[in-house]
Image: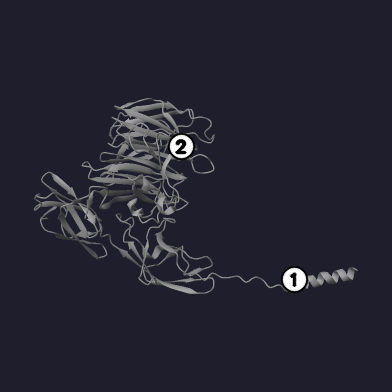
Amino acid sequence: MKKIMLSLIAASFLLGSCKQAEEIVRNQNNELADIYATKDGAGSQRLFEPRYSANNDTIYFDIPYFYPVDSDIETDLTKIILRSTVPSDATVSPALGGFMDVSKPFDLSIRSGSGEVNNYVVVSRKVGDLSIKSAKITFGTEEIDAIVNGNDVIFFVVPGTDISSAVLNYKINKHSTASIANESPIDLSQNRSFRVTGIDGVSKTYTLKAQEPSKLEYGVGINRRLWTKTSADLGQGGGQDVSMALSGDYLVVVIRSNPAVYRVYNRQTGTFVQNMVNPIVGNSFMIANDTVGNLLSSSYTARNGRFLMYKYKSPTDANPVKLVDWTNSTSTSVSASDGGIGRRVHVYGDLNSKAVIMATIGNSKSIYRWRVENGNLISNTPELLEYQNVIGATGHMGFYPEAQPVSGESNANYFINYAGDVALVNGGTQQKIAGFSLTPNVVGTSRTGIGFAEFNNAKFMALVKYQASTVTRARLGVFDVTETAKITLPFTDSRYSTLSMYESEDFTTSSNPNSTSDICIGFSPDRERMQVYMLLTGGGILAQEFTKYAP
């Protein structure tokens, strides 16, 4: 019997060993999904973007001659780092990710797992900066800023104005030259050519023209970049720049050291001016501005601590007024892990007249609301609101929810913004009125940083839209939310362009440990222009201006 059993086992083993292994199917895809260039010390930041030839077989990199562009640090094309994304199972030759000499064209091959090869040629060059940062003309006591629209530098001038001897002032890269001397008189009664030549010898010709503006009755028209500066450019570091606000000619940024430092910059140029007085002892994460430029700073306060808010007339106000001194009596029903207040505080209205202030509580669905009437706080004790439509299994809105009021009236509606939702909320019932489509194309992969303003008979909401789960890339998005029904439009709707008015390029950071960012919105003194500023912690600030004028 034992022999029979052994024979059966042996036969079974021999039969099983004859079973063929499953064939491994190799990936045939050899398309280059993404490529970008960076330099030593920049980590994974996308410093230099590619452009492609018409038939997609040549990749061009126009790399600034100096980087940062306005610095004296010349770019070394023999020490450029290329990073790419290719299909799984594919290989890249030559290998990327380390220093490369890109000063001469070279071949780049993507070989699929199945052996098919896709060949590219990579061509890089150093280029000068041919952009016009700003331009203006002065005549008598008047001054007009230009709008740079493509190759046109347009000065919108009221009919009948004598501009035959206007003085031209402009700002271009310090390594570039121009065909017209700065601060020289020009006759703009006729169009003038203006040529900018970069350090590489390449030129671009603009047309200076005076034009009667076509003023829009509604919404925004031409927009332009005011400036973009990294945290390093702004003298900040360590990923501690967390919020900002506008007042007059100034932009104030909070550095969340202990105690916090309030750094003041020229809002038109990003140039550091001074530090602002901070009466708060301990943590302070937030500063906000009302609709007329008063500033509101606040403490960060754990449960049962003193929550403070101070009102400033301007960044030069050495004696801010204590507006709120309240014990954070947040219910213990809020998650025991937090219950703090002061991470995000927003205001709308005029703090010297009528305004609403809203502050959220960490890891809860709670919002506190203060109201100002006739310049006076109605009560030091806030109203407690509970948002009724929290999305997510936790039942709360995380550490950094935001509630941005949209008016200074009692029961003002507000926008709620947290990881699970972006929505307009009824300020009386705390019920959602309308929510944005929660897709990356619309609101990013996640978001913090929201602002609201009314401009030229329209209502705008601005949002910081993260483009990666690591929150190291973000875009500024500006939406026209005048019509509530449009808030819900998906990206694929033909009307989506009437909701999304602007989206910037990617803005990057290498240090944003708490996933923080901020938005603030201001206006020119004549209210003809609206400026939207986006802060990305550890990355810097992007400033974009919108006008009432159409070309």
Whether residue 512 appears in this view of the structure is yes
- Element assignment for label 2: loop
How much space separates mark 2 and mark 1, taking CA atoms? 63 Å
In which quadrant of the rendered image does the C terminus lie? bottom left
**How far across and how far down the image is residue 212, in percent?**
15, 52
In which quadrant of the rendered image does the N terminus lie? bottom right
Residue 549 drawn above or below residue 347: below
**Type of amino acid under label 2:** Tyr
**How far across and how far down the image is residue 52, in percent?**
37, 67
Eye-nearest disc, 2 or 1: 2
- The residue pinned by badge 1 equals 16
Q: Residues within 10 Å of mark 2 (few under 14, many from 20)?
A: many
Q: Is residue 100 left or right of residue 15?
A: left
Residue at 54% across / 71% down in the picture?
113
The mark found on residue 481 in the picture is none
Counting the numbered discs, the total is 2
Residue 449 drawn above or below residue 111: above
Residue at 52% across / 33% down in the picture?
334
- Element assignment for label 1: helix
Residue nearest the observer in this picture, 469 or 537: 469
- The residue pinned by badge 2 equals 387
**How far across and how far down the image is residue 327, in percent?**
45, 26
Residue nearest the observer in this picture, 230 or 78: 230
Q: Is residue 321 left or right of residue 387?
A: left
Sequence-first tag of 2 and 1: 1
Residue at 34% across / 62% down in the picture?
63
Q: Is residue 362 left or right of residue 350?
A: right
Whether residue 279 appears in this view of the structure is no
**How far across and how far down the image is residue 73, in percent?**
33, 57
Residue extending farthest to the front is 485
